[in-house]
Amino acid sequence: MVSLEEVAIARPDPSELLSLMQQTEKQRDRRPLAYERLIGTWRLLWVANARKQRGRGVQMGAGRYLPAWLGITLTYTPAQRVENRVQLGPVALTLTGPVRCAANPSILAFDFTAVQVQWGNRTLYQGTMRGGAAAEAQFPEKPLREQAFFVYFYVGLQAIAARGRGGGLALWHRLGTPSGAPASIPTSIPDPP
């Protein structure tokens, strides 16, 4: 079985990757999340949705790779901000806002307070959302139960994996090479087979 760092190259079957993700989550390191290790741009590679079923609890879907033509990225900045960008051809939707590491060591809470829509290099719309500056000012004091968050259970040089507030799983692959990383690590995600 491949490691989470190798998934972008090896592209294991989605159900095999689901097993690997669940196994990694069970064995996760319980130390506090080092936000500095998240800084950079990460492309969403694979997702598995959680489904609540009556009498059975939460069941995980098999998971699926995102198509190469759909670019969904997360960018974490040193200023503790996040940018979530969805790129489809020349059209891009970008949401930005603050992030914070919660008291639970693996939780990263976030809120989106600004939105931008672009066609190529041209900005079609730019504005605030969900309360804008006022919501951003209140963000650090908001209880976690009222915020969106990821519980990161794997943070590597080239891959990060998390469970979202709704119970789904996601795997991202780093775009670009962090300083000190081996030159053989790919900086882009290949098309699926």
Image (cartoon, grey):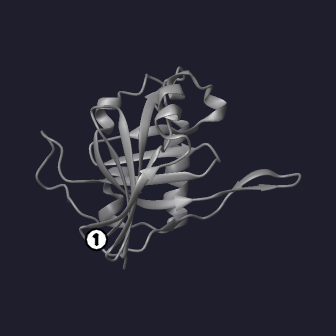
The reply, left or right, for residue 159 in relation to residue 188 is right
Foreground residue among 3 and 165: 165
Where is residue 141 shown, x and y percent of the image? 55, 21
Residue in view at x 47 percent, y 38 percent: 153
Amino acid at circle 1? Pro
Foreground residue among 144 and 33: 144
Observer able to see residue 60: yes
Observer able to see residue 116: no
Is residue 15 depicted above or below 40 in this figure? Answer: below
Where is residue 185 shown, x and y percent of the image? 19, 55
Residue in view at x 52 percent, y 60 percent: 47
Is residue 80 depicted above or below 8 in this figure? Answer: above
Instruction: Tell me how many marks there are.
Output: 1
The reply, left or right, for residue 180 in relation to residue 122 is left
The reply, left or right, for residue 43 in relation to residue 46 is left
Where is residue 23 shown, x and y percent of the image? 53, 45
Residue in view at x 56 percent, y 47 percent: 22
Quadrant occupied by the C terminus: bottom left
- SS for dot 1: loop
Q: Which residue is mark 1?
A: 190
Foreground residue among 101 and 188: 101
Foreground residue among 89 and 19: 89
Q: Quadrant of residue 120?
A: bottom left
- Quick one: label 1, few (<14), some, or many (20+) residues within 10 Å? few
Where is residue 50 shown, x and y percent of the image? 67, 55
Residue extending furthest toward the right: 55
Quadrant occupied by the N terminus: bottom left
